[in-house]
Amino acid sequence: MFQQLFDRFNDLVWGSELESKGTLGHIAALLLRHVYALVRDIIQGQLPLRATSLVYTTLLSIVPLVAFSFSVLKGLGVHNDLRPYMYEVLEPLGAQGREITEEVINLVDNVKGGVLGGLSLAFFIYTSISMAQKVEESFNHVWHVSRPRSFARRFSEYTLVLLISPVIVVVALGMIASISSNRVVQALLENESFGPLLVKIGEFAPSLLITAVFIFLYMYVPNTRVRFVPATIGGVFGGVLWAAIGAVFANFLAFTTTKTIIYSGFAVAISALFWLYLSWLVLLVGAQLAFYIQHPEYLRIGRREPHLSNSMRESLALNVMYFVASAYRDASRVMSFDELAEKLKVPAIALTPIVNRLEQAGLLLSTDREGMVPGRDMARIRLSDILEVVRKRGETGSYRGPRWLPGIAALAHELDDAVNGVVGERTLADLVDELSHKP
């Protein structure tokens, strides 16, 4: 009974029945597929586990990160101006949110100027970069990216963000203050028609700010190119979901606080941990939606690895080496992994094992700028070497070698001889020459 209902629902979601109903049916099918994929990833995937990991990382890094960022703001004399905005962000925690905000401000007020010098500054930057690295790993997991940023890129880009972000906050606060004090805005606030509308917009300002932060993170953090439209859809969805869960959480917290005192003095810590977990989970769910908007081909399979045939692996290996070698001959450009996946129209999850094996065999080499070049002279890379990577190199998982029947082992040798007879002594350079001269 349940299997029949599941099969019927599965056909409804992935079949063409809804799409045949016209525009509304097509929209309904898209919504159902995205909702199904997100719920599946939350229940069966690693999003909750990674959100929990980020909570743990946040607890280790939050004090140095907040102290570093707010101390920069303190040097500019504006850290106290953030108090109302922190109240708004932590509003779902109720009175505990105000308590946490005051503790943060007091922490910054007590930071001495010399604390941020020398080894302490290096420790603050290190812990902050470590947290950013964990966030990048989670986003790369969502985006099926197996190649993180190089250490040089991480250090330079993350340090730049840590130093620039407080300045951006100052500029934003200055713009908000100047806009609020503008005579036109003041006149509109006093107007009976526009005044309430502007007040409502002001109430939604924290949610809009969170949405903007989500969009920025979705476009900047993953080590791949994220288009603006998918990032915006994911950011808006994440911002709305964050505001909705915040309202529900605030009401739930207010109700339980008046009904029970089970956690007593631990209520602040437990509430903050749970809210932190929900915030990270919402951030990752929004990133997952942005990924599916940009890559709808993953909606049905999720993180299930595709089943490649031996013929597909051989074709992928030859294509990868050809495109990398062809690009390498043009000194002005180097083939990147994303460009390679786009050229082959193959999901990254299917391409990654092939590229990794070619690198392990020394046929491919990653550059400092995360491009790919041939591992040695193209005239010394035989096509049989490339095919051998995907045809012969492997393991059974046992510490002993497999025991083949003599007749089957002889047949396998005949197949290998047949392949070698086709490719002969042709090299990668020969292949590039042959294909580049074809119309």
Image (cartoon, rainbow, N blue to C red):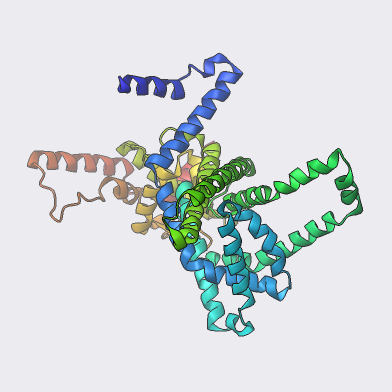
Q: Position of residue 103 (x, y in %)?
A: 58, 69
Q: Is residue 424 above or below residue 10?
A: below
Q: Position of residue 88 (x, y in %)?
A: 65, 54
Q: Is residue 28 visible?
A: yes
Q: Residue at x 43, y 61 (%)?
A: 56
Which residue is more in the foreground, 158 or 335? 158
Q: Picture quarter containing residue 101?
A: bottom right
Q: Is residue 325 visible?
A: no
Q: Count up the numbered dots.
A: 0
Q: Position of residue 406 (x, y in %)?
A: 8, 42
Instruction: Name the residue at the left extreme.
Output: 406
Instruction: Quarter of the image for the N terminus: give it.
Output: top left
Q: Is residue 346 above or below residue 389?
A: above
Q: Position of residue 250 (x, y in %)?
A: 56, 48
Which residue is more in the foreground, 196 or 234? 196
Q: Is residue 117 above or below residue 54?
A: below
Q: Is residue 130 above or below residue 138?
A: below
Q: Residue at x 56, y 78 (%)?
A: 121
Which residue is more in the foreground, 180 or 367? 180
Instruction: Quarter of the image for the C terminus: give it.
Output: top right
* Left or right: residue 311 compared with residue 297: left
Q: Residue at x 51, y 38 (%)?
A: 292
